[in-house]
Image: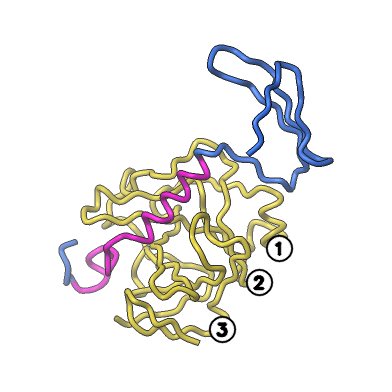
Amino acid sequence: MHIESTRFGTIELSDDAVLEFRDGLIGLPGKRWALIAQSDDTPFYWLHSVDDPSLALPVTSPWLFFPDYEARVADDDAAALELDGPEEASIFCVVRAASRLEDFTVNLLAPVVIHAAKRLGRQVINEAGGYSVRAPLFAEVELQQVEPASPGVPVAAWAG
Amino acid sequence: MLVITRKAGERICLGDEITITVMEISGSSVRIGIDAPSDVPIYRHEIWESIKEENRAAAQANVQRLPTPRGRSHDTSST
């Protein structure tokens, strides 16, 4: 299958790259999303709607930027994701991009949790307290220090 | 919308499984106790709204390409 992305053009997707978000993303329409990589050395992905070709959010692995980040998933969220243990969960945080690096922020309060084997995703509220929805992304590390993400989730390549 | 008046110590039932108790009223603040099954998510409204706002703002970012650390790939961009 493919997405005719208004942002990126045609993106080919294998079926195993399509993730089902049964409760959607908070405040956004659509229940099917896929991770898109723009290159293989980037710390960022796009979480792209499969149903709405104009809808995509930048995401990243929070540990690339905040090595001490903690994510605690509530029991009911874990059950909704059919997770049997933390090793099955891949965790991403939504990035609010800006024209200047120092204005990038990341939502550490509501991570996106993906159970890759089941192709299920869910945005949850982190039970580990004290995190912001708008944390400065480059507060602890500089861009040059950030390693590429290794998603643990099927990712569609976009060659644009 | 239903609007009702309650005093401290009084309760409201939502169906069989959810009970809301007005625990304490102090100035402009009200302390509320909620008894609900563990699978009923309960959030402060402003937290839910702030997540909505961040998701929508993230989706509207006018950005085509996200920054990549220079050095691993060729230095083609200064941002």
| Chain identifier for the yellow-coloured part of the image | A
Q: Secondary structure at mark 3?
A: helix
Frontmost residue, B45 versus A102: B45
Q: Which color scheme is applied?
A: by chain
Report if the CB atoms under discs 2 and 3 are less than 8 Å apart: no
Q: Are marks 2 and 1 on the same chain?
A: yes
Q: Work out how far the residue at label 2 is from the one at label 1, CA to CA, in angstroms.
A: 8 Å
Q: Secondary structure at mark 1?
A: loop
Q: Which disc, if any, is residue A82?
A: 1
- Between disc 2 and disc 3, whose residue precedes? 3
- Name the amino acid, label 3: Asp
Report if the CB atoms under discs 2 and 1 are less than 8 Å apart: yes
Chain B, hue in figure: blue
Which residue is located at x 45 percent, y 79 percent?
A156
Q: Which disc, if any, is residue A15?
A: 3
Instruction: Magenta stretch: give its range.
Output: B47-74
Q: Is residue B71 magenta?
A: yes
Q: Residues within 10 Å of mark 2 (few under 14, many from 20)?
A: some
**Mark 2 lies on residue:** A118
Q: Work out how far the residue at label 1 is from the one at label 3, CA to CA, in angstroms.
A: 19 Å
